[in-house]
Image (spheres, helix red, strand yellow):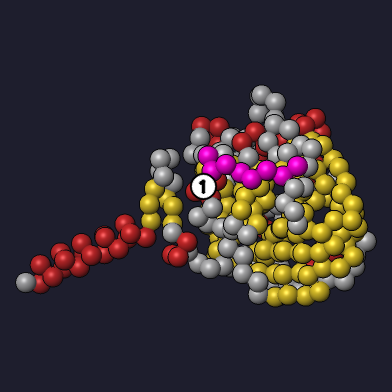
């Protein structure tokens, strides 16, 4: 009798586990939104793998969407900047134009979460992004956790960039970014900054400090944010304590040298 009861209990447990997750055709475990932490960040690849030249991913956007409605990243061959906002994913092309992403596009680097506003402040005006960074930092409860950051506002000036696809050869991103990127400016624009702040100790995993992308209210323009002037805005902050990661399952990722010091490369790629 006890053996039968144990067998039935084990069978029920297996059925419940199978019901909570599924796998796509790449073997990536896809967890239902309802079973994930409401304040979990999910990442594909690492910043060091991208800097090392791993430009092809194995996660489709339709699968990534299971993990978050808010975030940023890029696409295969670093073909433009990614922005996820309110559940929609956009690709910003090299001219700064926004396109809704097809579900079958893939990513070698992305960071997403289901954004839940926990802290909200009026930003006032700031003449540059560094002063905005300092202001936001004063609202952090700790420098040892991750923060998702959303800023809706009116911007008198935005200094942005996006890029054309990488050339063949998988050279380090710091060597190629100047050849493929395009910088441009938007003026007198309403829109949203989508971004994250990562602790310094996670520098081999993601960009330490602030990393911001921007998209306008009409969802037609955007890009990676270098600098800005904001006249007024609303700052929303979400502390994140749970972190999940998918390491790209390709030969290029598995054999890339990611042990180098990429600090200077990160600055060259992420800052103007």
Q: Is residue 59 visible?
A: yes
Residue 139, percent across and down? Answer: 76, 74
Residue 207, percent across and down? Answer: 71, 52
Q: Is residue 103 magenta?
A: yes
Q: In terms of depth relative to the viewer, which is nearer, 129 or 194? A: 194
Residue 170, percent across and down? Answer: 65, 28
Could you tell me which secondary element the residue under label 1 belongs to?
helix
Q: Is residue 229 left or right of residue 247?
A: right
Q: Residues within 10 Å of mark 1 (few under 14, many from 20)?
A: some
Q: In terms of depth relative to the viewer, which is nearer, 159 or 190? A: 190
The residue lying at 59 percent from left, 57 percent from top is: 87
The residue lying at 77 percent from left, 32 percent from top is: 180
Q: Is residue 29 magenta?
A: no
Compared to residue 198, the image places residue 5 above or below, namely: below
Q: Is residue 112 left or right of residue 203?
A: left
Compared to residue 218, the image places residue 117 above or below, namely: below
Report the magenta stretch's main SS: loop
Residue 41, percent across and down? Answer: 58, 60
Q: Quadrant of the C terminus?
A: top right
Residue hosting label 1: 62
- The answer to which image quadrant residue 260 occupies is top right
Image: magenta residue range = 97-104
The residue lying at 68 percent from left, 36 percent from top is: 79
Q: Quadrant of the N terminus?
A: bottom left
């Amino acid at each position: 009798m006890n053996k039968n009861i144990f067998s039935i209990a084990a069978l029920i447990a297996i059925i419940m586990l199978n019901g909570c997750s599924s796998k796509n055709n790449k073997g990536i475990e896809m967890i239902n939104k309802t079973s994930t932490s409401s304040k979990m960040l999910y990442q594909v690849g690492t910043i060091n793998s991208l800097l090392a030249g791993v430009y092809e991913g194995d996660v489709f956007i339709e699968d990534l969407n299971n993990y978050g409605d808010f975030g940023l990243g890029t696409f295969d061959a670093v073909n433009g900047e990614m922005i996820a906002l309110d559940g929609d994913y956009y690709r910003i092309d090299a001219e700064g134009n926004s396109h809704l992403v097809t579900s079958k596009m893939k990513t070698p680097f992305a960071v997403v979460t289901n954004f839940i506003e926990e802290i909200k402040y009026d930003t006032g005006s700031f003449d540059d992004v560094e002063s905005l960074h300092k202001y936001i930092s004063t609202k952090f409860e700790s420098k040892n956790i991750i923060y998702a950051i959303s800023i809706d506002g009116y911007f008198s000036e935005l200094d942005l960039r996006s890029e054309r696809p990488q050339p063949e050869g998988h050279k380090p991103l710091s060597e190629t970014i100047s050849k493929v990127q395009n910088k441009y400016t938007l003026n007198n624009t309403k829109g949203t900054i989508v971004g994250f702040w990562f602790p310094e100790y996670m520098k081999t995993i993601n960009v330490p400090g602030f990393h911001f992308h921007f998209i306008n209210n009409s969802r037609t323009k955007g890009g990676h944010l270098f600098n800005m002037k904001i006249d007024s805005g609303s700052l929303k902050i979400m502390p994140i304590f749970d972190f999940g990661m998918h390491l790209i399952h390709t030969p290029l990722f598995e054999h890339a040298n990611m042990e180098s010091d990429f600090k200077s490369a990160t600055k060259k790629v992420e800052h103007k």
